[in-house]
């Protein structure tokens, strides 16, 4: 498959990533159980009457998608593809609460209609009056990667020229309570955490929305080439290095050709061992991490992709992301490796545009 170009990138996250100077103002967070996204003033983007009916993830995605389309100078994409792990959790919880409170009677359908995972892609299409291909992937932590793969295939097959691809996940009070109970979220007594040397299980949970316009042609705004993607739902720890080496070999690259590797260290001692294994392969590459900036969540890889795009475009690595001190003259190839709790492993290879 030929490379496609990432022609715009927009992100709403725990950091102030809509601000033009966010690159110099990244603030790590290691002492809260849950991190909230910095949201824009939605009144500037969405009519208040419509905004009141939207859940947080729909609002974040609407704004991030508007930013991405504006930057790429695209009014109507040829396809809209969204990846999400949890979908519209707030409306799902409201619907289920209604079911319980009303003894399963006299229910209004609104919360149910808005609780489906494909609400985000649908609302974006409605706002744009876009009648093109519209699809949502729900594959836990590889939802964005599946979305990228679909978009790449559409562009390579000549089905589309410009595709809006996004990832989004929100927090809800009840789900966070359940995550605390099943020890997904790090216990209070285990905070603050050292993301790279954690000895306890559990993570700090985040949220956010990241949107990109993928195009067939390179433009003056292009951030990166999306060269290849590999996804593996299950991986034994001993297979980690082979998984990465086979992926690089498929792309006619060696480990020395990778200038930077972005790893998804989350502070969960049980699953971070995969990243430690991966680090051993890349002694000459710049090793980076990012979940101390975004928190862990199903589509956290959207934040790492957004950061990788800016690193390639600016040819600069924020110091707050560095694990080691290795630096190369120019940054040409970046490898992103991510999983969630040891499942759904993904590799994304980005090249300089």
Image (cartoon, helix red, strand yellow):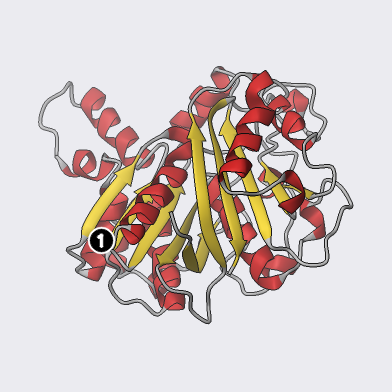
In the image, 25 versus 84, the foreground residue is 84
Is 133 rendered above or below residue 113?
A: below
The residue lying at 38 percent from left, 72 percent from top is: 45
User: Residue beneath label 1, please?
Assistant: 159
Q: Secondary structure at mark 1?
A: loop
Looking at the rendered image, the quarter that the C terminus falls into is bottom right
* Quadrant of the rendered image containing residue 198: top right
Q: Position of residue 148 (x, y in %)?
A: 42, 51
Q: In this rendering, does residue 208 appear at all?
A: no
Q: Position of residue 170 (x, y in %)?
A: 45, 44
* Quadrant of the rendered image containing residue 279: top right
Along the horizontal axis of the image, is 39 left or right of 263?
left
Is 353 rendered above or below residue 186?
A: below
- Residue neighbourhood size for the residue with mark 1, other residues' Cα within 10 Å, grouped as few (<14), some (14–19), many (≥20): few
Is 96 rendered above or below residue 315?
A: above
Q: Position of residue 226 (x, y in %)?
A: 51, 58
Along the horizontal axis of the image, is 113 left or right of 291?
left
In the image, 163 versus 49, the foreground residue is 163
The residue lying at 52 percent from left, 22 percent from top is: 234
Number of on-image labels: 1
Q: Position of residue 351 (x, y in %)?
A: 61, 61
Outermost right residue: 325
The residue lying at 26 percent from left, 34 percent from top is: 95
Q: In this rendering, does residue 287 appear at all?
A: yes
In the image, 194 versus 273, the foreground residue is 273
């Amino acid at each position: 498959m030929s490379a496609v170009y990432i022609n715009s990138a927009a992100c709403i996250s725990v950091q102030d990533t809509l601000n033009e100077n966010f690159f110099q103002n990244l603030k790590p967070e290691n002492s809260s159980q849950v991190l909230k996204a910095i949201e824009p003033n939605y009144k500037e983007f969405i009519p208040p009457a419509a905004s009141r009916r939207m859940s947080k993830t729909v609002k974040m995605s609407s704004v991030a998608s508007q930013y991405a389309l504006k930057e790429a100078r695209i009014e109507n994409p040829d396809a809209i593809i969204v990846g999400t792990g949890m979908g519209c959790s707030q409306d799902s919880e409201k619907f289920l609460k209604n079911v319980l409170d009303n003894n399963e009677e006299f229910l209004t359908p609104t919360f149910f209609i808005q609780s489906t995972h494909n609400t985000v892609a649908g609302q974006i299409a409605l706002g744009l009056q876009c009648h093109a291909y519209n699809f949502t992937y729900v594959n836990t932590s590889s939802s964005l990667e599946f979305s990228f793969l679909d978009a790449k295939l559409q562009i390579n097959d000549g089905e589309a020229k410009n595709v809006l691809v996004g990832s989004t996940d929100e927090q809800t009070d009840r789900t966070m309570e359940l995550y605390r109970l099943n020890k997904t979220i790090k216990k209070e007594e285990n905070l603050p955490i050292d993301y790279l040397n954690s000895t306890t299980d559990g993570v700090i949970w985040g949220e956010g929305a990241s949107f990109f316009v993928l195009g067939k042609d390179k433009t003056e705004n292009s951030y990166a080439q999306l060269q290849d993607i590999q996804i593996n739902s299950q991986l034994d720890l001993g297979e980690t290095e082979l998984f990465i080496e086979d992926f690089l070999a498929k792309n006619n690259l060696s480990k020395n050709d990778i200038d930077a590797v972005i790893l998804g260290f989350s502070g969960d001692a049980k699953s971070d061992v995969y990243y430690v294994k991966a680090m051993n392969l890349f002694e000459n590459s710049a090793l980076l991490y990012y979940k101390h900036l975004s928190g862990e969540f199903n589509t956290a890889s959207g934040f790492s992709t957004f950061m990788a795009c800016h690193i390639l475009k600016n040819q600069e690595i924020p110091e707050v992301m560095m694990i080691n001190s290795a630096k190369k003259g120019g940054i040409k190839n970046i490898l992103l490796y991510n999983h969630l709790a040891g499942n759904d492993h993904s590799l994304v290879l980005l090249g300089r545009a």
